[in-house]
Structures are given as structure tokens and as C-alpha cells.
Amino acid sequence: MLYWLGVAGFALTILISVSLHEAGHMITAKRFGMKVTRYFVGFGPTIFSFRRGETEYGLKAIPLGGFCKIVGMTPQDDDVEPEDQPRAMWRFPVWKRTIVMSAGSITHFLLALAAAWVVAFTLGLPNTHFPTTNADEAKQKAYVTVSDCTWITIPTTQQDCVPGQNGGITGPAYAAGIRDGDLITNVGGTPIATYGDLTGAIRSLPAGKVDFEFVRDGVTKTVQVDLVTANRAPLTDEDGSGPTSEVSVGALGWDNVGVPGTIKYNAASAVPATFNYGWFIVENTFKSLGKIPSKVPALWHSLTGSERDPDTPISVVGASRLGGEAIEHGVPELFLNIFITLNIFIGIFNLLPLLPLDGGHIAIAWFERARSWLYGRLRKPDPGRVDYYKLMPITYAVILIGGAFTLLTVTADIVNPIQIFNR
């Protein structure tokens, strides 16, 4: 039940996002004086509609997006009434048309940033610098992960750590009040900048009480941690050289310290974290777009019984299914992070300089402007507007390829979906 509620909830959030995308176009167009005749949520048969001023608003039966009709988007539009000609979109300055056409994508970006900011100080944002090697880990900021138990001597066989049994004790960091996601900034008067600094500082201290300064939710706190003597593996150089036998050190319990998968912020520190996370997604979106052609064969093979590559593209259907899994397994932060990522992807994709995407209209507007400027400098007659009819073969090709790819991803997401959790 939770799964299907999550699927429906995610699909609804995307429908709202797309509707707001179209609202972005409509609002900016109206503000500049362009005429908007229709704004509808969905496609297909009309369920209901009403008119306010010169615009008809309504809901259609197929909830797969929405649209708004701006009069005269191109000079070739033949449905512009004579009295509306001065308000035709193509007659407005290029910067105004750029704002109107980019307003949809900007809406997606704003939705993603707003969601990321809320997630940052409520659930925590993913750690985008999560290390993959020991050397990388040592260079990370000293965020910690703590548990309520650690070993005086790490056992040779795998077993649960229980305080008071088989060498297990209450973790010193946990006992002192340090919790997951705290950022250690000072140990016994020694400034800590990285996880490597934290490791070195603790191992240089004898057992006993020492002051730990840390930051939690933007607030700096200091506690006394009672370090214990424990046997641990020695530190080695990056090439693996160094001593091999265990050493006795003053320790928090090394199984209690690590780099967290998520980091929580306060409302103020969440602002730069939100932009950093957003930029991380932007960079990876462009990388993903570049990899799409190479992923098509894997998508096709997933339809014939091959295991679905988790790195293959997904459709809104697949994203909704992942959102359902997130809710079913009690991981709302995953639901929201998928929502954030998908909005940024849609925003960037719509700005690609290809018709019929918004970016295609923007590219043509600026091409016209640059060409008119160049001809003016050369003292030649202005060549006028681009003939959209001549671009129709390219437009149809983009629609055909995009439609085929969408059909492929939707089918793969139904037949052989990517799953994060075993259901």
C-alpha cells in the first residue's frame, strides 16, 4: 500500500512541477504584454475549463504534463488575429522572449533548490564528496558516525558488539554525546581540518579525558571524551608501507568513526550546501546526457531478459517507482532527492538548443539577433526572421528520436525496472 501511495505521490509531484513549468511561461509572457490564450494541465479531452480575462484555464483527462498557448511564438504562426499582431511573441525583444522561454526551466531549478534547502536542515543532503579509497577518506572533513559500542580489541570472528561482553564497551564518543553527522573541529587544543587530522590527533593522545569541539546543525559545542586504551591496526602510508602489528592507542573506537552518507545543516548553512549540491547534480546531469547513446543497447537488452543496468536512464515512470520504494521503506530523503535530481534534469534538458524544446526557440532568437547585428555591421539588408518551416525536418527527427527513446525507457521501467530495495 505504501509503495503505491509513494508512486502516486511522486507522479503527482512531477505533474505539479510540469504544470508550474508552463505557469512560468504564462506568467512571464503576461508580464511582458504577450497574449496567452490557453493554460491547461494535462492533455486529451477537456474535463473542465473556465475563462479569466483573455485566457482559458482548464484540466484535461491525461495527466502527462500541460501546456500554455502564447500567441505568435513564430512568424509563421497563421492563427494570430489581426488585432493581436502587435502582441505576437515573435515581435518582442529577444531578451524578453529568452526570459519567457527559459522561465519553465528556471521554475524547475527553483523547485529543486527549494526542496534541497528543506532537505538540508531536516533530513540531510547526500555527502557529495563521499570517499572511495582510504587516501580519499583521510582528506575529508572530520564528520563522524558513532554507535553505542566499540571493541577494546577487535575480535577475529565476526560478532555483534555488546557493552560488557567479549571486550565490548560503550563507545566513548557516544557516551560523551557526540552523534552521527557531527563535524569535529578541535581535539585537545589541536585544530582538526580533515578526517586524517582527527585520526592522527586521537592516536597521539594517551587514554583519558580530552576536550572535543564539534559543530552540529551550525552550532559549536564542546564535550569531554574519555578516551580508552585499545588495540588497533597501525597507520600506514598511502602505498601500504609501514608497520603491520597492532598498536595500543587512546581511542574513540575506530569502528565508531567514519564519513557519513548524509550531512545535516541548519537553515543558514543549508543555503551554500544547497547550491553546492545543486551544482553537483548539474555536473552529473551533463555527464549522464553524454552517456545516453552508449546506454541505449543496455536498455534494449533489459527488455529481452538481461539484468537491468542501474546506470541506465529512467523515465518518469521509473522515477515514480523509485519514489514508491523510498516511501515503502521509510526513506523520504531518497524520495525528495529523486525529485530534486529529476527537476534539474528536466530543466537542463528543456534548454538544449533543439526544436521543439524551449532551448531551440531561444537559440533561434539569438541566432536571428546575431545575424541581424552582423548584417548591420556589413551594411547589408537585415535577412529577417528564421523560417521555421525549413527547420521542420530537423524538428521531426528530434521528436521521432526523443519519442522512441522515451518509449524505450518507459517500457524498460515497466518490464524490467531499476530497484533500490528488494521488494
Image (tube, helix red, strand yellow):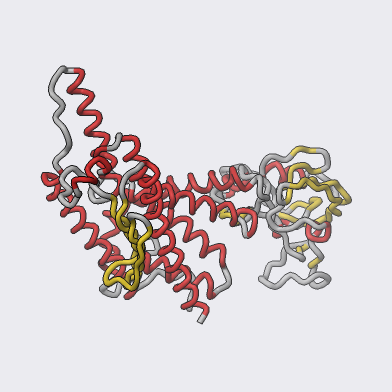
Q: Residue extending furthest right?
A: 209
Q: Is residue 26 above or below residue 314?
A: above
Task: Please tell me in which quadrant of the rendered image residue 299 appears.
Answer: bottom left
Q: Quadrant of residue 412?
A: bottom left
Which of the pair 238/175 is nearer the observer? 175
Residue 203 appears in view: no
Task: Count up the numbered dots.
Answer: 0
The vertical placement of 371 against 246, above or below, is above
Q: Is residue 186 above or below residue 169?
A: above
Q: Position of residue 349 (x, y in %)?
A: 34, 50
Apparent side of residue 83 relative to residue 1 in the rendered image (left or right): left
Residue 237: quarter of image: top right
Coordinates of residue 149 in the picture (x, y in percent): 76, 65
In the foreground, 242 or 191? 191
Q: Is residue 224 left or right of residue 319?
A: right
Q: Between residues 244 and 408, which one lies in front from this camera angle?
A: 408
Task: State left or right for residue 238 relative to residue 13.
Answer: right
Q: Residue at x 17, y 48 (%)?
A: 77
Where residue 300 appears, x then y in whole percent?
25, 66
For image coordinates 83% across by 71% down, the residue present is: 164
Residue at position x 71%, y 72% in the image: 160
Relative to 400, 345 lies left or right? right
**Rendered position, 118 above or below 162:** above
Q: Determine the residue positioned at 18% across, 51% down.
A: 395
